[in-house]
Amino acid sequence: GINAEYGTALSKELHFLPISARIRYKIALLMYNVVHGQAPEYLKEDVGKRQRKQIGLRADDDSTLLEEKIHRSLKVRHNATKRGISIAGPVIWNSLPRLLRESTSVPDFKKYLKHHLFIESFGHS
């Protein structure tokens, strides 16, 4: 309706991210901290840098990729498990452009991440 369109237009004008993008922003920032060794221990235990595979894959050249650390108790994946940070975090992080993942400062990462998510949410304009 009109109110939804107005809300979207206002959010766009004020550079507010939609809720789903804000959630991805927070998770991506947590993963940035994992990559740079600044995350809490419980996150470091559940998420780690992607290990090289035995067969040569293009992804092996990208040291910024993350992967979940599967716990033995999580043999069966279901929807509740997929929402867990150990799975959602690497999925969100790995979906970011490599240049963004390679940011060397938190302020730069936050700025470019917000811009990336804003463009993803609203497009160029």
Image (cartoon, rainbow, N blue to C red):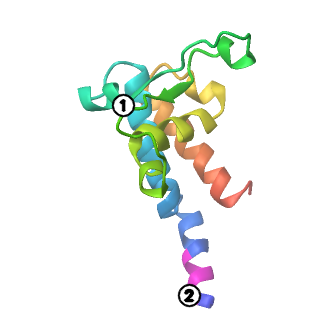
Q: Quadrant of the C terminus?
A: bottom right
Q: Image quadrant of residue 1?
A: bottom right
**Which amino acid, mark 2?**
Asn
Residue that appears at 49% across and 47% down: 77
The residue shown at (56%, 27%) is 101
Q: Is residue 91 visible?
A: yes
- Whether residue 12 sits left or right of residue 107 in the image: it is right
State which region is magenta.
3-7
**Residue at image location 72% in from the left, 56% down from the top:** 123
- Reply yes or no: does residue 37 show up in magenta: no
Position of 21 relative to 65 (above/below): below
Label 1 is placed on what type of residue?
Asp
Near-viewer residue (102 or 42): 42
Q: How many marks?
A: 2
Query: Is 5 contained in the magenta span?
Result: yes
Residue 60 position, x and y percent, is 66, 13
Q: Main secondary structure of the magenta part?
A: helix
Instruction: Find residue 54 and report its image quarter.
Output: top right
- Identity of the residue drawn at 63% across and 13% down: 53
Near-viewer residue (124 or 89): 89
**Secondary structure state at the residue bearing disc 2:** helix
In terms of depth relative to the viewer, which is nearer, 80 or 22?
Answer: 80
Nearer the camera: disc 2 or disc 1: 1
Residue 61 image point, x, y percent: 67, 11
Q: Is residue 52 above or below residue 71?
A: above
Q: Which residue is mark 1?
A: 46
The residue labelled by disc 2 is 3
In the picture, measured across the screen, residue 87 lies left or right of residue 62, that is left
- Tag 2 and tag 1, C-beta contact below 8 Å: no
